Image: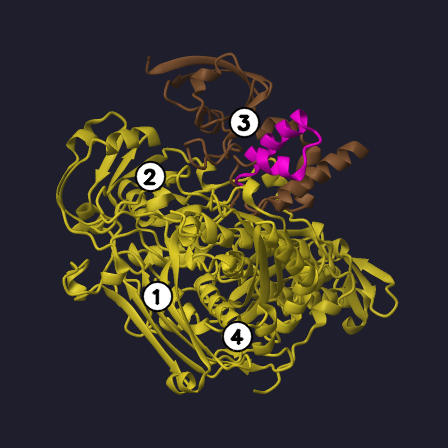
Amino acid sequence: MNEVVADRWILDRPNSYIGRSVPRPNAPRLAEGRGTFVDDIELKRMLHATYVRSPYAHARIKSIDPAAAKALPGVVAVVTPQEMAKIHDPWVGVLTHLEGIKSAPQYALPLEKATWQGEAVVAVVANTRATAEDAAALVEIDWEVLPPVTDAETATEGETPLIHNDLGDNQAWQRKADFGDVDAAYADADHVVEETFVFGRHTGVCLESRGLVADFEPSEEQLTVWHNNQCPHMVQNILADKFRLEEHKVRVITRDVGGSFGIKVHTYADEVATVGLSIMLKRPVKYIADRLESFVGDIHARDHRVKGKISVKNDGTITAFEIDDLTGIGPYSMYPRTSGIEANQVVNMIGGPYRFDNYRAVANVVYQNKAMMCQYRAVGHPIKCAVTEGLVDKAAKILGMDPAEFRQKNFHSDDSYPTKSAQGMPFENLSHEECMKKMLEAMDYNALKADRDAKRKDGIYRGIGFASFIEVTNPSAMFYGVGGARISAQDGATLRLDAKGNVFISTGATEQGQGMEAVISQVAATAVGVPPERLKIITGDTEHTPYGGGTWGSRAAGIGGEAVAQAGRQLRVQILEAAAAMLQEDASTLDIRNGVVVDTDTDNERISLDEIGRICYYRPDTLPDGFQAELVATKHYVPRKFPFAFTNGAQASYLEVDVETGFINLINHWCVEDCGTVINPLLVDEQIRGGVVQGLGGALWEECLYDDQGQMLNANMADYLVPMAAELPDIECGHAVSPTSDSDLGAKGAGEAGTCGAPAAVMNALNDALSPFDARMTSMPFTPKKVLQALNKI
Amino acid sequence: MDMYSDITLTVNGESVTRCVESRTNLVDFLRYELGLTGSHVGCEHGVCGACTIRMDGRIVRGCLTLAAQAEGAEVWTIEGVSETNEIRPLQKAFVERNALQCGFCTPGMLLTIAELMERKPDASREEIREFISGNFCRCTGYQAIVDAVEIAREKGANS
């Protein structure tokens, strides 16, 4: 590989805001309750939609009688699937680069049968949401209940009923991978260690549920949608396509979004239906999922069973990994990203931190009558990490090696880059050794081990667990675009100097609370040379931002930020050309610092940006003949040298198990990660902490429990346990810094690292704590009941 | 029970009289009738704490309280306590410490913490965590929120 050298000009700017914990410009407004979330939007003549949802996991719709519902005062429409299907085209969640993946056409409302409990079947529209819900209870549906497919293990067996007859079977996709010679490695190994891991189904539980206000204006065929999706341009494209509208007449606006985490990045049938209702009724229609609907309507994630193997030599060398992954994805593959990506990520990234040459994998992705499963924060990462790190720990134990030492022996060393994984994934520059070293120091590992060992003598069972990981960030077109998904891989930024010397920034990246606006403002302030308070950020509007991909896959800072850096530099050049014309100077001798044009060498102030704005806009007649000031700059950026910017890190957990009650008390948690250039240390650390806690949720508490009839048993916030403040530890963060050479800024993503490694660290700590009992746990979530079962106490 | 109820209450210091559907809960009344959209709806079954408001000096769940129950009551929402500057140091600490990300839980979280700071100004980190354990935040992992309480307390003591 040729060495690629980035120009780090932005890190050398005077008055740089890169690397500073600048507060978020949008935070004070939110802290005063002055946000504008979708449900805060009210339009004239706006109607409210709700949906009659299937009470069965698998049932044919024999007939629908809307009469009683329609008769209720205040009800404006009751819309059946057949009526809705007249105005839209269905979608199929497949991508060509996931070779062989298949799915059935999905409609806004299902035409023949409901395929999961909670699927929206009939739409009810009324003057108020309460009236719509009253009416929904009056819609009579005659169901023919069909046997549901619930167990992924038997989903593709001959006697199992088919969910979609046209597909021929319940297999959505199969991915196989084979690198090196695994059988030869096994034959040559001193130990082949096996383990089966189970990852429960869980879901995002964004505190703000999914929602939209759709407003169709028939005379211009203009559709405007206020939506809390992460990707406004993707939604624009899909709605135009499915409703046969002109794309430039579909406007998608995302204001404040109350958390997303990948939940709000998909095409939900009930949201498409709401748009359809506005088109039919020619009035604004609002739909906000309530919490009970969210549990069965939002995508679920994980739900994997992975049989894993690792082979090692007595000297502690890892020689091979092998996995057999099975995942149930609900009745359709989600559009447009598909529900195959999580399994694909698992296959691609097993063993990521370590040197080995032999790898074999099979992943089976199957349909079932449960809520749809798709990409959620750290897609596939918690699974591949826990499988890898669980196997690594078990192997270390068999070899009698310290788990930290065993990892250090097998890491891709920090001086070995660029290199590739066994699967052929290119690693540009990672820092496993440095991260582990820093973390062991932060933990005071030897003292911690002594504490653990001393307490065991008193009957207190504590455990230390590690997880090293790699993480995909800054995705290029290789992620979705090559498979045919119309999701912009590149992002753009337009910067405009106004007549007062302030700078407007339009960006395709979007904000859901992660702090994107702060990051964008820091980059722009640095690139142009103005203080952040002179910036105004415009985001989340397809009519006013450059076409872009939005925020997902840890891309907003690394991709959106780089576009802002380049546009900022370009705008600075253009401003200096205007200044040079005014000052009769050579532009190359000038710079912009703190909002003032200065002589580069002496810092001597020459002219302020507001004066430049005034002259360019109001008195261009005073400028030299032939000089036209250009005070708008647009640049785009997409990673081209690497398909993804891999990041890496290490986490550790210290916990205590109450062997009488099965309760797990988290004592401490550490994460040292490497996201390249750290633009805002405060925001990065809080992304890590929030991500760790989401990972802890899946490891310890969160699970969508289903019975064998496909009924979700805990679809409410009282019974579905999310992490709350009292049961969480403080989380200590640290960093290594290996900037990517794919951009000048060098930033990689940071939003998913926490979620990636936390479950593995907790699992390994738990098993360390249980080691005196010869008990091992590998099925998440690790509930007190499962702990007691592992200890043979119940 | 009648379908409709006439209610008069004080909201953020202003007297309000309305005729509401008796089944209307207090947070929906505040949001849709009065336009006070700072109070959020997260679960509508009393678990998440996003709709936390202050009624007659104590925090209540706006989704588990009927508007009709607020007859004669004094209600404060995030808008009101922001405009009076009552919780300004806490809000500043939240911003400084990045104790909010999406901001959806924040109004309920702030009103909850304001009550804690009044009832137990010297609460330990564990006690802060315990007190806010009825307020779900999906973004932060709570540590920054606990830190922000300590920062606000410190700055309050020094001001």
Q: What residue span does the magenta drawing correspond to?
A: B104-131
Label 3 Cα crowd, 10 Å radius (few <14 / some 14-19 / many 20+): many
Query: Which of the 4 image quadrants contains residue A596?
Result: bottom right
Q: Does A28 sit above or below residue A13?
A: above
Give the chain ID for the brown colour: B
Q: How far apart are marks 1 and 4 (CA)?
A: 36 Å
Residue A159 image offset from top left, x and y in percent: 14, 62
Residue B66 image offset from top left, x and y in percent: 43, 21
| Closer-to-camera residue (A354/A588) | A354
Give the chain ID for the yellow colour: A
Is residue A114 left or right of A599 when viewed as pictured?
left
Q: Which of marks 2 and 3 is in front?
A: 3
Tell me which amino acid carries mark 3: Ile
**Mark linked to residue A283:** 2
Q: Distance between the residues labelled 1 and 3?
A: 43 Å
Which callout, 2 or 1, points at the residue further toward the start of the chain? 2
Is residue A691 left or right of A105 when viewed as pictured?
right
**Mark linked to residue A788:** none
Return the residue at label 1: A340
Report if the CB atoms under discs 2 and 1 are less than 8 Å apart.
no
Label 1 Cα crowd, 10 Å radius (few <14 / some 14-19 / many 20+): many
Q: Check if residue B123 falls in the magenta segment.
A: yes
Chain hosting mark 3? B
- Could you confirm whether marks 1 and 3 are on the same chain? no
Return the residue at label 3: B53
**Mark linked to residue A399:** 4
Q: Does A636 sit above or below residue B145?
A: below
Is residue A487 left or right of A766 when viewed as pictured?
left
Q: What element carries label 2?
A: loop
Q: Distance between the residues labelled 4 and 2?
A: 69 Å
